[in-house]
């Protein structure tokens, strides 16, 4: 592995770690409450299974990236690392998709099902969820860049 490729991979992994940590922290701290007809309504990430999946998937991706930072760069397991990068990228994209679906219902509601939007009542919660989704989307893009970078270097290695 050339030095430039190694630096690029490390840089992308550090970016992925930062984005996933940010997504986890912002989602874990997302909570807000409001009073409706003398009833206290509390919104937090743990109220929904999709948000829990989101936090767990982001934490797994972060842990995986941290583990790879401590492995040798000249490993003979590069195919396994590439395969696991693809799995993590798919995990991230599915968790973002699930959380985004719930966030959309929270923001817009669903008139056909009679679900009202909640972001007008708990804007702090919705802002935190939006921030977490942006960070997670960035992490997914970074993982796709890691995959493309690995595939490009493998192609150059195999066919040159």
Image (cartoon, rainbow, N blue to C red):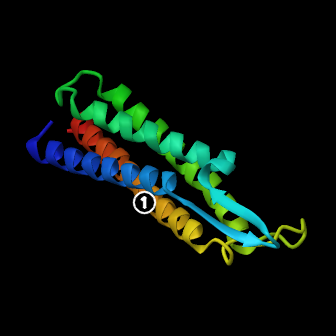
Rendering coords of residue 23 (x, y %): 44, 54
Q: Is residue 126 left or right of residue 21?
A: right
Task: Locate the N terminus and report the quarter of the image it occupies.
Answer: top left
**Which residue lies most toward the bottom here?**
120
Rendering coords of residue 55 (x, y %): 52, 45
| Residue at x 60%, y 53% (from the top left corner) | 45
Q: Which of 123 and 112 is in front in this view?
A: 123
| Residue at x 50%, y 51% (from the top left corner) | 28
- Is residue 157 visible to the viewer in this orientation of the structure? yes
| Residue at x 29%, y 41% (from the top left corner) | 155
Q: Is residue 57 above or below residue 99?
A: above
Q: Nearer the viewer, residue 38 or 138?
A: 38
Task: Locate the C terminus and report the quarter of the image it occupies.
Answer: top left
Rendering coords of residue 121 (x, y %): 68, 75
| Residue at x 73%, y 74% (from the top left corner) | 108
Rendering coords of residue 40 (x, y %): 73, 64
| Crowdedness near tag 1: few (<14), some (14–19) or many (≥20) residues, C-alpha within 10 Å | many
Residue annotated with mark 1: 135
Q: How many labels does the image show?
A: 1
């Amino acid at each position: 592995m050339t030095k430039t490729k190694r630096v690029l991979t490390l840089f992308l992994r550090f970016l992925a770690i930062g984005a996933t940590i940010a997504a986890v922290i912002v989602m874990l701290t997302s909570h807000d409450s409001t009073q409706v007809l003398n009833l206290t309504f509390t919104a937090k990430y743990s109220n929904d299974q999709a948000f829990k999946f989101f936090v767990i998937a982001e934490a797994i991706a972060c842990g995986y990236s941290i583990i790879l930072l401590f492995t040798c760069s000249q490993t003979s397991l590069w195919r396994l690392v590439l395969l696991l990068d693809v799995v993590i990228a798919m995990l991230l994209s599915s968790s973002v998709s699930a959380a985004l679906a719930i966030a959309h219902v929270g923001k817009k509601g669903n008139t056909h099902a009679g679900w009202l939007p909640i972001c007008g009542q708990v804007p702090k919660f919705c802002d935190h969820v939006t921030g977490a989704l942006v960070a997670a989307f960035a992490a997914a893009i970074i993982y796709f860049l890691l995959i493309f970078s690995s595939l490009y270097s493998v192609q150059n290695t195999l066919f040159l």
